[in-house]
Image: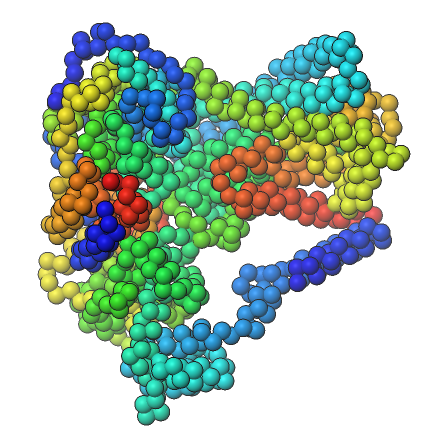
């Protein structure tokens, strides 16, 4: 492919040199850049698409089916369901299922597919690898939140057990993935969490966000755009069929119920656990005011989080605004004797209590 | 110690971690600070914070909406102006000394010991000339620029510049401190690359390294000024030519800044999006600079190290330049063959074979591009100028220089494209080597090298076509 | 443990400029290795220069010394190798500079660690100090920038600080060479074993974590009786630091 392109470019250059005309050469240039763009566009380029449409790897199909069965254990799963959910052709799904029945991963139960014990273990392993990768991407790389899922979706099929082990060790055997889902251990142990969808809370109830589902992507992106953070306390102000309104960290958020349904919360009953209403984000601090740091949101991860802690943004630290930027961002905060400038997306994740 | 017990310890650690949960790091960090607060409570007897806030008063001015930017442009402008203007005189002196006084002595020494012409030519007209040239042109501006810049650094002003400009850099996925590594690049790209150490976020540091080359360095300013004076200043009435050529040079520098932002943005969205990115910017207190110590270390640490690297690369380049001009294949020199071969491609992008060859052999230092171009032009046109094949030269008179270039077929388009290409081509070999040392990665070094050339070829090509379409 | 009075140093040796020697972590030619650690911009390189007579680049700008710089000085027939570590805010993170600093203090086993702090920002600086004190028990606090502290009317009770930290504290103004002789004398006494430290150990940790650390560090101590910093190892193991696990496995600590 590449050689072909090089030959074409060479030929074009030759043409340009010997029958030169600026208009033609400009046209040739534009056309050939467009061709190159079409072929090599990352993730959407023709080369990429061609390479990917040829090989539907059976292993990937099987593992994807396993995950569907694992995540939808309450539903009745049929071939149709799988075709819809995974987007493979019927024939591919059917041959995958055949293989799985042969190797005792699934069985039929009244026309519905169910996981065997072996299949369940296999599925847990895939889920483990997926969540480990998401955690890795969140902690050790700079990829944007919105990209974690997609990358982990690819990596989970390429990682063998030893590599998963190594990944886990490198991350310090984490318990939760960045969305708040538990990561199964290598022996299949899974931390328990009891949570309900945000949309299921009654007015006045207080809860803590412990999970934001990254699937489906459209809804996830909406939640991301709102700057709603895992670990934040929320209080429901309004909950009806058109919208869910809640208060959190000094701000009011308004979501459609279907969006709110993708946010899982843990209801706080214990009065002591319920935060003061005066806890707000650092971005809400005004020049001249002082405040005490309450902590850093769980949304700040990896090196960024550790750096903030190192710089003194720990519970109990006094903070005030020292310098306002001509552009409005970053802001210079005075903390523990030094002026430290932070950008707004960092300050959003620091919780304070104004004096 | 057997493996089993270690395994057991690690297993125990894992079990305990499971029990204490994910907040271990936070709790530890908070605990340490709590201890620190208690100790400080004990140890600090009196604390009045009044004078300490003098810093804050200065800060309110230098980061203010009204004064922040004027002060910044004024200071950086002064530094650049002092560098470019101030370097002229010592450069001329050094060049008189190294080329005018020493070289004849070396030559007579060589003939005294009966050295054959090709050996003395190779050594004196090739190696020595290139080295002398690089020293004469490079040393004075760096010896002015680095101490000035280091003094600003020592005073504590530079972090404020990063603070003021961070917003713009954030928009293109970069760090505010890149404003400083970029400014340093106006002095010397290799030093600018070293300076990226102040950026402690991996992604932003790589961006700053790869895009530093878009800062028009000291070695390229004279080329820009010369060509703008000869070709661009000449198309307007004489009374305005000074202003116009200055504006053209300034425009090229600004174009470089634009490319820097653009490429930073593109890199952060594509190649580098997976690299870890953090942000923090501490604004240290203002301190009176330690004048002499600063001058000393900036000369030793920055100027001489960069100069030495440049010399190491310039010597073989001088040798190569002399050899290709003096070794013949068939009836013409290697240089002439290469030029002939490159002319076609050069024409398409609005340059010519001489310019392309000059950029290839003068990769060690941008400073020797113009002397090489002049020498090669004389070589292929057979004019009577300079000192012979393979001997780089420059002329004191702008008019004579113009005459040679015009005889070489230069037009205004050629000049504009050389100015653009001088901005957009591979970093000099000193910088490439420095990038490798700083990144320890062949991949990023390669990308930092290739990317600007591709951009340069595309830009000059497009400009040439459009120019010709309009001109016809 | 006390701050040494000025008179101790009336017969100090002249500093011996040995030039920059890149010896890696090889300490054969030296009697003692001294590490210089501290937050960025606290004057480490200035102290380094004052001790070695070298002229390392200093600058008012956090984060310039990234590679390690080494030099040497001689005092009372003893040769000291001095290593200027990159400035860091902490040793708990994973940035390149921190790794260099942490690995040197942990594996390079310096005889003495000089922790340079900014007297004007003591609390912030103590964050790093307390971490270092978990790793090594031969350290001296160089309370630098005292001239600025005086100007800012910050009065520090050096005695109580030394008592709380359990290490000697030497106030200096490195830029004006004040306090340097006392610092040298203290380094000398620490290296010779004339001063024994009882460094502060981190206290304010939640109970469950403290218990876990205790359990783990007792186990580590039992298996590796020679390590002075079993508590720090326990901290790192709880954090899942892959490098420390590897070091345990490879037997660096034996
Ligand atoms: N006033 C004053 N300034 C100092 C002192 N020690 C260092 N400095 C200045 O503090 C800045 C940082 O010093 P440097 O040695 O580079 O710090 P490092 O980053 O810790 O190596 C420089 O501008 C020094 O001149 C001191 O004792 N008094
Ligand atoms: Mg330093």
Q: Which quadrant of the structure image shows residue C49?
A: top left
Q: Seen in the image, is A35 located left or right of residue C68?
A: right
Q: Which quadrant of the structure image shows residue A52?
A: bottom right
Q: Residue furthest right?
A: B331
Q: What residue is drawn where x is 62% and y is 29%?
A: B313
How does the figure colour the protein chain or chains?
rainbow
Q: What residue is drawn where x is 39% and y is 64%?
A: A160
Q: Residue furthest top?
A: C11
Q: Seen in the image, is C247 located left or right of residue C228?
A: right
Asked if residue B21 can be seen in this view, the reply is: no
Q: Can you say which quadrant of the picture contains the C terminus of chain A?
A: top left
The front one of B136 and A202 is B136
Q: Residue A33's x, y, as percent? A: 67, 57
Q: Seen in the image, is B114 located left or right of residue C6?
A: right
Q: Residue C146's x, y, as percent? A: 24, 20
Q: What residue is drawn where x is 45% and y is 44%?
A: B204
Q: Is residue B224 above or below residue A89?
A: above
Q: Seen in the image, is B245 located left or right of residue B40?
A: right
Q: Residue B183's x, y, as percent? A: 51, 32
Q: Residue C157's x, y, as percent? A: 13, 23
Q: What residue is drawn where x is 75% and y is 27%?
A: B322
């Amino acid at each position: 492919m590449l050689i072909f392109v090089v030959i074409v470019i060479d030929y074009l250059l030759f043409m340009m040199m010997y029958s030169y005309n600026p208009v033609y050469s400009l046209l040739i240039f534009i056309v050939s850049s467009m061709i190159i763009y079409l072929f090599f566009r990352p993730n959407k380029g023709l080369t990429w698409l061609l390479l990917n449409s040829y090989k539907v790897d059976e292993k990937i199909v099987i593992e994807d089916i396993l995950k569907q069965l694992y995540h939808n254990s309450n539903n009745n799963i049929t071939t149709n369901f799988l075709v819809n959910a995974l987007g493979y052709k019927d024939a591919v799904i059917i041959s995958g299922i055949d293989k799985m029945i042969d190797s005792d991963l699934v069985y039929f139960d009244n026309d519905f597919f169910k996981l065997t014990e072996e299949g369940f273990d296999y599925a847990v392993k895939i889920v483990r690898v997926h969540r480990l990768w998401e955690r890795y991407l969140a902690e050790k790389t700079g990829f944007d939140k919105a990209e974690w899922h997609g990358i982990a979706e690819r990596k989970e099929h390429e990682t063998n057990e030893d590599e998963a082990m190594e990944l886990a060790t490198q991350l310090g055997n984490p318990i939760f993935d960045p969305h708040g889902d538990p990561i199964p251990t290598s022996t299949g142990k899974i931390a328990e969490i009891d949570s309900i969808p945000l949309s299921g809370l009654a007015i006045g109830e207080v809860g803590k966000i412990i999970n934001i589902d990254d699937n489906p992507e459209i809804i996830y992106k909406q939640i991301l755009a709102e700057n709603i953070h895992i670990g934040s306390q929320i209080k429901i102000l309004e909950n009806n069929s058109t919208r869910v309104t809640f208060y959190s960290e000094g701000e009011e958020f308004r979501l459609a119920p279907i969006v709110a349904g993708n946010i899982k919360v843990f209801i706080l009953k214990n009065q002591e656990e319920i935060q003061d209403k005066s806890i707000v984000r650092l971005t809400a601090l005004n020049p001249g005011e002082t405040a005490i740091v309450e902590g850093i949101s769980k949304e700040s991860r990896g090196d960024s989080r550790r750096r903030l802690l190192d710089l003194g943004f720990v519970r109990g630290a006094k903070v005030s605004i020292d310098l306002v930027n001509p552009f409005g961002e970053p802001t210079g905060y005075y903390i523990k004797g030094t002026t430290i400038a932070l950008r707004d997306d960092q300050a959003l994740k620091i919780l304070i209590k104004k004096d | 110690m057997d493996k089993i017990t270690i395994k057991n310890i690690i297993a125990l650690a894992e079990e305990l971690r499971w029990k204490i949960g994910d907040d271990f790091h936070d709790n530890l960090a908070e605990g340490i600070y709590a201890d620190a607060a208690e100790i400080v409570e004990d140890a600090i007897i009196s604390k009045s914070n009044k004078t300490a806030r003098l810093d804050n008063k200065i800060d309110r001015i230098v980061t203010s909406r009204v004064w922040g930017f004027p002060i910044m442009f004024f200071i950086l402008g002064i530094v650049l102006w002092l560098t470019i203007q101030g370097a002229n005189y010592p450069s001329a002196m050094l060049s008189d000394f190294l080329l005018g006084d020493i070289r004849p002595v070396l030559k007579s020494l060589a003939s005294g010991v009966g050295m054959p012409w090709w050996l003395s030519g190779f050594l004196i007209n090739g190696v020595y000339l290139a080295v002398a040239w690089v020293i004469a042109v490079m040393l004075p501006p760096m010896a002015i620029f680095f101490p000035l810049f280091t003094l600003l650094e020592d005073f504590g002003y530079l972090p404020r510049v990063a603070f003021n400009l961070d917003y713009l850099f954030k928009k293109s996925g970069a760090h505010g401190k890149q404003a400083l590594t970029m400014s340093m690049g106006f002095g010397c790209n290799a030093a600018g690359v070293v300076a990226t150490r102040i950026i402690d976020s991996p992604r932003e540091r790589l961006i700053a390294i790869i895009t530093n080359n878009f800062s028009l360095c000291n070695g390229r300013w004279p080329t820009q000024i010369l060509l703008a004076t000869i070709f661009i200043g000449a198309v307007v009435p004489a009374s305005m030519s000074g202003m116009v050529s200055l504006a053209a040079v300034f425009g090229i520098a600004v174009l470089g800044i634009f490319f820097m932002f653009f490429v930073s943005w593109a890199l952060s969205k594509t190649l580098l999006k997976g690299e870890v990115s953090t942000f923090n910017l501490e604004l240290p207190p203002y301190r009176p600079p330690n004048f002499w110590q600063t001058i000393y270390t900036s000369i030793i640490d920055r100027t001489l190290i960069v100069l030495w690297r440049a010399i190491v690369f310039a010597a073989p380049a001088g040798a190569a330049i002399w050899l290709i001009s003096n070794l013949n294949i068939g009836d013409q020199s290697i240089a002439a063959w290469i030029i002939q071969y490159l002319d076609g491609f050069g024409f398409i992008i609005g340059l010519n074979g001489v310019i392309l060859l000059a950029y290839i052999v003068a990769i060690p230092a941008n400073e020797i591009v113009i002397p090489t171009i002049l020498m090669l032009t004389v070589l292929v046109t057979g004019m009577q100028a300079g000192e012979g094949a393979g001997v780089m030269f420059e002329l004191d008179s702008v008019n004579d220089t113009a005459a040679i270039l015009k005889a070489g077929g230069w037009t205004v388009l050629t000049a504009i494209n050389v100015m653009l290409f001088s901005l957009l081509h591979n970093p000099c070999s000193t910088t490439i080597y420095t990038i490798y040392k700083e990144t320890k990665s062949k991949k990023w070094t390669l990308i930092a090298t290739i990317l600007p050339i591709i951009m340069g070829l595309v830009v000059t090509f497009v400009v040439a076509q459009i120019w010709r379409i309009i001109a016809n | 443990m006390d701050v040494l009075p000025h008179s101790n140093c009336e017969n100090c040796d002249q500093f011996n400029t040995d030039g920059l020697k890149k010896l890696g972590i090889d300490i054969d030619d030296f009697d003692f290795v001294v590490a210089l650690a501290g937050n960025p911009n606290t004057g480490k390189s200035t102290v380094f220069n004052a001790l070695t007579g070298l002229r390392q680049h200093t600058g008012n700008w956090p984060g310039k010394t990234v590679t390690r710089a080494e030099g040497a000085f001689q005092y009372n027939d003893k040769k000291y190798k001095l290593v200027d570590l990159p400035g860091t805010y902490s040793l708990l993170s994973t940035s390149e500079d921190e790794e260099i600093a942490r690995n040197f203090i942990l594996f390079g086993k310096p005889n003495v660690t000089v922790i340079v702090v900014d007297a004007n920002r003591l609390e912030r600086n103590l964050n790093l100090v307390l971490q270092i004190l978990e790793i090594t028990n031969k350290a001296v606090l160089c309370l630098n920038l005292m001239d600025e502290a005086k100007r800012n009317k910050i009065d520090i009770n050096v005695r109580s600080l030394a008592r709380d930290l359990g290490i000697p504290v030497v106030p200096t103004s490195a830029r004006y060479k004040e306090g340097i002789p006392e610092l040298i004398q203290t380094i000398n006494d620490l290296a010779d074993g004339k001063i024994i430290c009882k460094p502060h150990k981190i206290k304010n940790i939640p109970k469950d974590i403290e218990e876990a650390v205790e359990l783990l560090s007792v186990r580590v101590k039992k298996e590796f009786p020679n390590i002075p910093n079993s508590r720090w190892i326990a901290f790192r193991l709880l954090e899942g630091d892959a490098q420390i696990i590897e070091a345990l496995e490879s037997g660096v600590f034996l």
